[in-house]
Every structure is written in structure tokens, then in C-alpha cells.
Amino acid sequence: MNTLLNINDQEILLNRFPKSNDKNLQAWDSSDEYVLNHLHSLNLSNAKIMIVNDSFGTLACALKDHQLFWQSDSYIAKCAVEQNIEDNQLSPTIEYLDSLTAPKITPDVVLIKLPKSNALLAQQLQLIGEIISHDTIVIGFAKAKDVHNSGLKLFQKYIGDTTTSLAKKKSRLIFATKNNAIKNNDNDHLTSWPLPDTELTIFNHAGVFANNQLDIGAQLMLENIPKDLKDGYVIDLGCGNGVLGLGVALANPEATVRFTDESYMSVASARLNCEKGFESQDRFEFDWHDCLSGYDYDQADLIISNPPFHQGKTVTDHIAWQMFHDAYRTLKHGGTLRIVGNRHLAYHIKLQRIFDNCTTVASNSKFVILDAIKY
């Protein structure tokens, strides 16, 4: 649904990505307005601004007159920014950065929308703390309900002196100033855990799903990995740390496995796990991408997935729909999509509608594994 943001004498047409007709899925919130209004009040001209976690490009569009360094873990967020910039016929000076890459300059301002997890916030704040000066203005922003003492302590640890604003429209700002007394000694935000019944250790960057332990849905899938793929081509769709694709690789030593996810940290984790777990990397491929958009028809013998049912903090089924449609297009005739999901999500209905078939492979009290074949 198109949403028109009127702010600081600008009218900006904003859409989520992919575009949705759901009137409840707005492309910006009151915390975006709050931080933009505050920045406008500072009357900063020609400032170099680093923007972190701008989900749909609200800040990038509103701050088009500045030199921008836009950083996100999300490929979908990058697509949204590019789409909204194009829809509004803007031409900002903008450098896109993945979540593990810092700008090569010292920004005058850093605007960071609080992510879902403190682990990811810590990683992002450490990166910011290493590139800013004592004069850099650092502002965090979020809905007030998402601003917690644990997050404020991370600003204090990685940046320096930290204060908060009054709440306005149920949103709050966080102000942090670099402090010489703060020492950033924690240089590694990787977590790791052993993969049961294998010799592999799974490494996870901060923004990755199930980065502290094996997800129970993934465990059920690993117990039901196909073992007869020979030299088949397999895609781990929405790969996360790559654990499902790694399971395929272990069970099928001749198969080629492609790991794809819209999270940059997920793809980086999958790549690291392949490098740590296998001597040869010749049969592994990696792609930071929006589902399988742009992939060729009739390409894969098997696609495996543990689909997400949320985008950021919004529960939605459109990602699963896109994954299943993309999988149908990308599979060879006779190829299989195998997914694991919570029972209550009723993925069998979607798969039956798209593939005209769906088979239950395994299940437990909470999860179900489903196969759909492209005939």
C-alpha cells in the first residue's frame, strides 16, 4: 500500500518491499518521524550521514540532500530503498554497505534503528564505535516499547555516554557520545555450537536466526535429509547459518549446494561453515539475494527451506508465498521442494495450490516436513 509521508516540507511516497495492499503494513513508523524531525532541528548542512537498519528507505529518501552511507543486513531492505528512491525520482549520493562493512570515512551523523536482537545491536555498535570521532552525532531510535536498559548498556559500552529523549508518539531517541574511557575489546561477535551427530561446528554471525543452538525445526529436517541425490543441484533457500545445506552436503558428497538468503550475515555464516567443515569448496555457491528472484527455470533438483514467517517485527506470510512460487519456477521437472514449518502455518494449503500436490514426510507435535514435486 502506498503511504505518503509528509515531513519537513517534503512529501515522500513510500512502499514496503515487496509492495503490499495490506493497509496495516506501513513503510515507516513514528520513530522514523521522530528522528527525522530531531535531525531537521539541528540544521545540519552537508553532513555525511550513516544510516543503519532503514527497513524501507524512509530515511534515505528524506535525507536525500546529504551524502549517505546506508547499511543493512537485509537485501530486501536494499531493494526497498532502491525502489522508493526510483518511485520518488530522487538521485541521492548514496553508498550501500552490507552489515559487515563500514564506510571508509568518518560520518558526521549516525542514525541507527534498533534491531530485533541485542546480539546484532552489539555488533553494529562496535563497528560504529570504531569509525566515529568524538564529534560524531550518534542517535538510536525505536518504538518506546523496544528501548530497554540492556540496549542502552550496549550504547554505553561501545559508544560512550548515553541518554534518552522523552517518549513521543510512543517512540524514543537514544543519544550517545564517544568517550575515551570506553574500550571496545570484544572483537568477535561470532557464536558457535556443535552440530549433533557430526564433526561440524556451526558458526553464526550476530544477526543470524538460531545463532545459539540448533532450531528444533531444523533438527527434524536434518533427520529427514535425502541421501540419494548423487551429483544433483540443491538450493538451501533462506539458508540462515547453512545448517540444512550442510546436512545435504554431508549426506550427498557429490551434490552441489547453493546457499541463498536475504540476510548478509546468514550467507557469510554459511560460507564460513563450509570453509570450516569441508576441505574443498568447489561444490558450494553463495548468494545474498531476495528469495530466488531472477533465477532460471528448471535449475534445481532439490530446494530445501525453513521459511521465515515474519519480516523484521511484522508477522506475514508473503515471504513464504514468494519462496514457494520462486521454488516452483526454479525446480527442474521432477524436482522437489522440501520444507519444514510450524504446524499452525498450514503451508500444505499453499503448496497444494502452487504444485497441485503435497506430501507429509515427517512430523512431531510442533513441526511438519512437507514435500511438493514439480511435475
Image: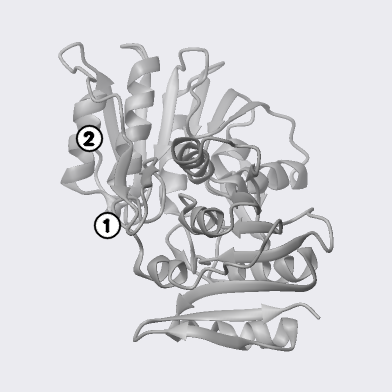
145 and 341: which is toward the camera: 341
Is 251 situated left or right of 302 in this image? left
Label 2 close to label 1 by CB (< 8 Å) = no
Label 2 and label 1: CA atoms lie apart by: 17 Å
Q: How many marks?
A: 2
Residue 233 in the image: x percent, y percent? 71, 57
80 and 252: which is toward the camera: 252
Residue 216 in the image: x percent, y percent? 35, 69
112 and 228: which is toward the camera: 228
Is 96 situated left or right of 220 in this image? right
Q: Secondary structure at mark 1?
A: helix
- The amino acid marked with disc number 1 is Lys
User: Residue at (42%, 39%) from the top-left corner?
Assistant: 35
User: Residue at (40%, 45%) from the top-left corner?
Assistant: 207
Is 230 situated left or right of 250 in this image? right
User: Residue at (56%, 65%) from the top-left corner?
Assistant: 305
Which quarter of the figure is the N terminus placed in?
bottom right
Crowding at dot 1, Cα within 10 Å, few <14 / some 14-19 / many 20+, comes out as few
Query: Disc number at residue 154?
Result: 2
Instruction: Look at the image and tell me whether residue 207 can be seen.
Output: yes
Is 373 situated left or right of 304 in this image? right
Residue 195 in the image: x percent, y percent? 35, 54
Residue 21 in the image: x percent, y percent? 66, 71
- The image shows residue 18, relative to residue 50, as above or below, that is below
Crowding at dot 2, Cα within 10 Å, few <14 / some 14-19 / many 20+, comes out as some
**Residue under circle 1?**
145
- The amino acid marked with disc number 2 is Leu
Q: Secondary structure at mark 2?
A: helix
